[in-house]
Image: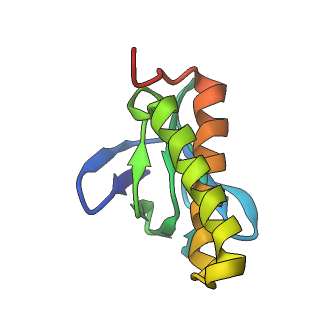
């Protein structure tokens, strides 16, 4: 089956795969060849693309997955390989999100956006830790 991972900035992946594991809104799920058509929203988390016994991990910050006729496409807000994630920047994003949530009680900023930013930051740091992503100084 063919899979593409697209963001507004880049085409991160385009190729034949045996399966893909995705972070769905209702939990993780796997798609194999000849899967029934599906459209699912994605939450921040890990996408694993498998070709044979080799798996390649990608981080997506959210988006959508569509699959039909053995063609899958991930339309992600952002998507990164482990090497593209800079831990220092991800930690700074986490700190900013936490600060926004604390300020929101006083200034009533958009709580949903602040919570989403926090979820993305935590998810990126977990992914980076799992795959040993470099810090900005490396």
Q: Quadrant of residue 22?
A: bottom right
Residue 115 quadrant = bottom right
Q: Is residue 110 visible?
A: yes
Identify the residue at horizontal 60%, vertical 48% (top origin). 95
Position above or below: 101 against 128: below
**Residue that appears at 38% across and 32% down:** 84
Q: Is residue 19 above or below residue 68?
A: above
In this view, the residue in front, 93 or 29, is 93
The reply to whether residue 36 is visible in this rendering is no
Q: Indicate how the structure is coloured in the image.
A: rainbow
Nearest to the observer: residue 74 or residue 88? 88
Residue that sits furthest to the top in the current view: 138
Q: Is residue 96 left or right of residue 104?
A: left
Give how far across and how far down residue 65 sits, in percent: 50, 67
Which percent across, then down, holds residue 39?
Answer: 54, 76
Q: Which of 51 and 114 is in front in this view?
A: 114
Tally the numbered discs: 0
Across and down, in percent, residue 129 comes to 64, 27
Give coordinates of residue 131: x percent, y percent. Answer: 59, 24
**Left or right: where 43 falls relative to 10:** right
Q: Is residue 131 above or below residue 57?
A: above
- Residue at (47, 23) in percent of width and height: 135
Q: Nearer the viewer, residue 83 or 13?
A: 83
Q: Residue most toward the right?
A: 27
Residue at (70% x, 66% y) in the render? 102
Q: Quadrant of the C terminus?
A: top left
């Amino acid at each position: 089956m063919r899979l593409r991972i697209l963001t507004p900035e880049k085409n991160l992946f385009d190729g034949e795969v045996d399966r893909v594991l995705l972070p769905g809104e209702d939990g993780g799920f796997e798609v194999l060849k000849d899967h029934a058509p599906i459209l699912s929203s994605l939450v921040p988390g890990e996408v694993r693309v498998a070709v044979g016994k080799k798996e390649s991990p990608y981080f997506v910050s959210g988006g959508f997955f569509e699959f039909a006729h053995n063609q899958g496409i991930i339309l992600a807000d952002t998507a990164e390989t482990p090497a593209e994630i800079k831990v220092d920047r991800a930690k700074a994003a986490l700190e900013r999100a936490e600060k926004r949530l604390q300020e929101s009680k006083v200034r009533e900023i958009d709580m949903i956006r602040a919570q989403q930013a926090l979820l993305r930051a935590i998810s990126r740091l977990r992914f980076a830790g799992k795959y040993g992503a470099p810090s900005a100084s490396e």
